[in-house]
Image (spheres, coloured by chain):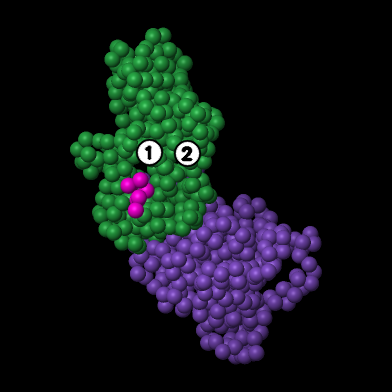
């Protein structure tokens, strides 16, 4: 198969996926040092969806996410140093150490926040979309969610309102088939796939292989164009595969909760290597380009970890600060 | 004559007029009844984008209010009963109350959530709950409970323009309360209680509708030579401790009135704090008069003695002082126990 994408896009997709993978694997490698003292949900193996949307969204588009948010934050342009420092609990973290891995924010990049309650930011994203509609903007709000979110009431309530008001919101569902150890089969009826359930609300839907970054990119581009042209919300379901345990740095397939055949099949669909092989065959970049890219990513990641580990912890007084705001703070992004 | 309900409507009108970022939505907001008259004419005046009805989706609509706030707006969400808003506890507690804190003080969430408290006329177990202590227990939420019609607008405007999430609790029995005070259009600071009556016998601390009962009781007691401080809290989070403390140092006795269930409630908290702060000043055991620790039933036969009324307050003040008091003047004015007055003929 020969890709019909530009060389520039191919590099962006490759770099985006590699950057996420490198950060996540670096966290995994250092987690046992016991310095990153918070629950951490890694996105290794699930990079393609984030890398693709990262090449499409503007910095003025808004995004929210859930507990597994590193990839979304990074793809949206979130500050890597501030994210790593946040995981290390340092005052230079994006939430001054108040939030940790599950509470990422970088409003300058339009990343408006991720939180730790499944489905909790879905209505927040829809509310942001309503604010964009009121302002007459053609920016969009992007809500990242996993397959379990589609089991919450708040998801359907939010979708219903988004459809009612024809809001500029993109729901990006990464279906990795497992909520912790619980397979989709014990959580949702198999009669309809996730995107089919959503289609019942009359919104634009699409689905695809979440590990095929080029196809993800094409589907997202179509969906984003649909939303920007004022035609209302879109919902995309991408099937993908999380490498490591739900929360933490380890592999846990020794527990036997995912069938061997399933694991093998998804390991063969590894998103980065498969894409790069094809891209090289399609003359979009060379092995040497990849090496250069990886080397610059390695430097960036190492620098971010050095920054985080050299940063101060917040002072003890900060523990009781930030309960109430004293004045209305204009969002950095809104200025 | 202006009423509590018309003052709420006027406050919303003024906020919408003065600040284009204010939004007002909730079930029934633009309907012909306009949430007991509190939202009448607003959609006509400010349009469907800023004033709108909503899906019966309390949790998501609260999250949508939060998102709109993060997008630069100041939403006012209305629930016709507090009980309905319980579906939104996740968004209120985990998002609205925490956003400023959990992102290190970067962004505030200026939303106001109006919830109406039912009572009597068969409202029953799930249309009459006064759960102010739930919200007041959560760091990051402010909780406002106006009692007087003359305070309703000033407190509402302060709530809307406060940078934090504010739970604004309106007692249904107050909507027809009247005021002849001049409309100054002034904001009443949150966290500032109001001393409604001055005396040295007992400090009575009260909220919301209980303040109306307390006013009757205090005035009847005054005629019998017993004068009390009556402090209307106006906000139950934050609480104006200074005003309560100063009064208790004068009287040495405290009675706290609350519309909520007793155990783990606001009244217990106030008594605990005042006991800690004013132990040496207290000359009698503190007293709390609240709803009992069971739900309000529907049948009028089962609600007769459910709520604290003025006569109970007056009698209890008498017993705190070891004095006989007559509650006849109060009883003479009493109509049916399950309505706030003859203006109320149902249905809710």
Q: Quadrant of the C terminus of chain A?
A: bottom left
Residue positioned 45% across, 19% down in the render: B286
Instruction: Indicate the quadrant containing the N terminus of chain A: top left, top right, bottom left or bottom right.
Output: bottom right
Q: Which chain is green?
A: B
Q: Would you place residue B124 above or below residue A17 in this image?
A: above
Please tell me which residue is depicted at 68% across the width and 75% down the height of the picture. A270
Chain letter of the residue beneath label 2 in the structure image: B
Q: Position of residue B258 (x, y in %)?
A: 44, 29
User: Can the viewer see residue B76 in this picture?
Assistant: yes
**Range covered by the magenta-colored residues:** B32-38
Q: Position of residue B14 (x, y in %)?
A: 26, 50
Q: What residue is rendered at 27% in x and 58% in y? A: B45
Q: Report helix, strand or loop for mark 1.
A: loop
Chain A rendered in what hue?
purple
Q: Which residue is mark 1?
A: B345
Q: Position of residue B134 (x, y in %)?
A: 50, 39
């Amino acid at each position: 198969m020969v890709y019909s994408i530009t060389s520039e896009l191919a590099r962006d997709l490759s770099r985006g996926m590699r950057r996420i993978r490198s950060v996540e694997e670096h966290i995994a490698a250092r987690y046992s040092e016991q310095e990153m003292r918070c629950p951490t949900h890694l996105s290794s193996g699930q990079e393609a969806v984030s890398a693709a949307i990262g090449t499409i969204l503007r910095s003025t588009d808004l995004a929210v996410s859930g507990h597994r948010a590193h990839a979304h934050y990074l793809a949206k342009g979130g500050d890597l140093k501030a994210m790593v420092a946040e995981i290390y609990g340092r005052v230079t973290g994006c939430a001054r150490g108040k939030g940790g891995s599950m509470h990422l924010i970088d409003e300058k990049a339009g990343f408006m926040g991720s939180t730790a309650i499944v489905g909790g930011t879905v209505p927040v994203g829809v509310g942001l979309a309503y604010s964009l509609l009121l302002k007459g903007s053609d920016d969009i709000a992007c809500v990242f969610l996993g397959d379990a979110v589609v089991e919450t009431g708040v998801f359907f309530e939010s979708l219903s309102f988004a459809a009612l008001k024809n809001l500029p919101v993109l729901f990006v569902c990464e279906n990795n088939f497992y909520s912790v150890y619980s397979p989709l089969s014990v959580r949702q009826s198999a009669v309809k796939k996730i995107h089919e359930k959503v289609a019942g609300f009359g919104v634009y839907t699409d689905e695809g292989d979440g590990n095929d970054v080029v196809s993800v990119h094409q589907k997202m581009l179509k969906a984003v164009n649909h939303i920007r042209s004022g035609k209302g919300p879109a919902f995309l379901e991408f099937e993908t595969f999380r490498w490591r345990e739900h929360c933490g740095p380890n592999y846990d397939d020794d527990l036997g909760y995912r069938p061997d055949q399933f694991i093998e099949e998804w390991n063969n669909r590894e998103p980065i290597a498969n894409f790069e092989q094809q891209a090289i065959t399609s003359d979009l970049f060379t092995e040497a380009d990849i090496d250069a890219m990886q080397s610059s990513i390695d430097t960036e990641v190492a620098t971010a970890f050095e920054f985080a580990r050299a940063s101060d912890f917040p002072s003890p007084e900060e523990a009781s600060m930030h309960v109430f705001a004293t004045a209305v703070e204009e969002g950095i992004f809104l200025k | 004559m202006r009423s509590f309900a018309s003052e709420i409507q006027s406050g919303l009108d003024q906020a919408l007029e003065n600040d284009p970022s204010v939004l007002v939505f909730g079930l029934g907001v633009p309907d012909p009844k306009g949430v007991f008259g509190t939202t009448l004419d607003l959609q006509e005046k400010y349009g469907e984008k800023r004033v709108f009805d909503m899906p019966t989706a309390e949790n998501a609509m609260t999250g949508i209010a939060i998102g709109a706030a993060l997008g630069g707006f100041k939403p006012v969400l209305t629930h016709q009963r507090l009980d309905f808003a319980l579906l939104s506890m996740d968004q209120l507690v985990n998002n609205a109350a925490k956003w400023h804190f959990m992102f290190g003080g970067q962004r505030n969430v200026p939303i106001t959530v109006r919830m109406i408290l039912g009572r009597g006329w068969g409202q029953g177990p799930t249309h009459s709950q006064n759960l102010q202590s739930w919200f007041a227990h959560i760091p990051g939420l402010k909780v406002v409970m106006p009692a007087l019609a003359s305070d309703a607008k000033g407190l509402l405007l302060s709530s809307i323009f406060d940078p934090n999430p504010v739970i604004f609790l309106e007692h249904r029995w107050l909507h027809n309360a009247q005021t002849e005070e001049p409309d100054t259009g002034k904001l009443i600071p949150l966290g500032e209680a109001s001393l409604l009556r001055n005396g040295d016998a007992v400090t009575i601390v009260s909220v919301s509708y209980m303040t109306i009962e307390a006013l009757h009781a205090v005035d009847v007691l005054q005629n019998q030579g017993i004068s009390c401080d009556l402090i209307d809290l106006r906000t139950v989070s934050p609480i104006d401790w200074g005003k309560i403390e100063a009064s208790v140092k004068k009287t040495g006795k405290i009675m706290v009135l609350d519309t909520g269930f007793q155990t783990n409630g606001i009244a217990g908290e106030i008594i605990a704090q005042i006991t800690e702060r004013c132990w040496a000043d207290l000359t009698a055991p503190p007293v709390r008069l609240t709803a009992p620790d069971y739900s309000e039933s529907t049948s009028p036969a089962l609600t007769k003695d459910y709520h604290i009324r003025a006569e109970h307050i007056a009698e209890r003040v008498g017993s705190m002082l070891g004095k006989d008091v007559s509650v006849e003047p109060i009883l003479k004015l009493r109509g049916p126990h399950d309505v706030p007055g003859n203006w109320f003929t149902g249905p809710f």
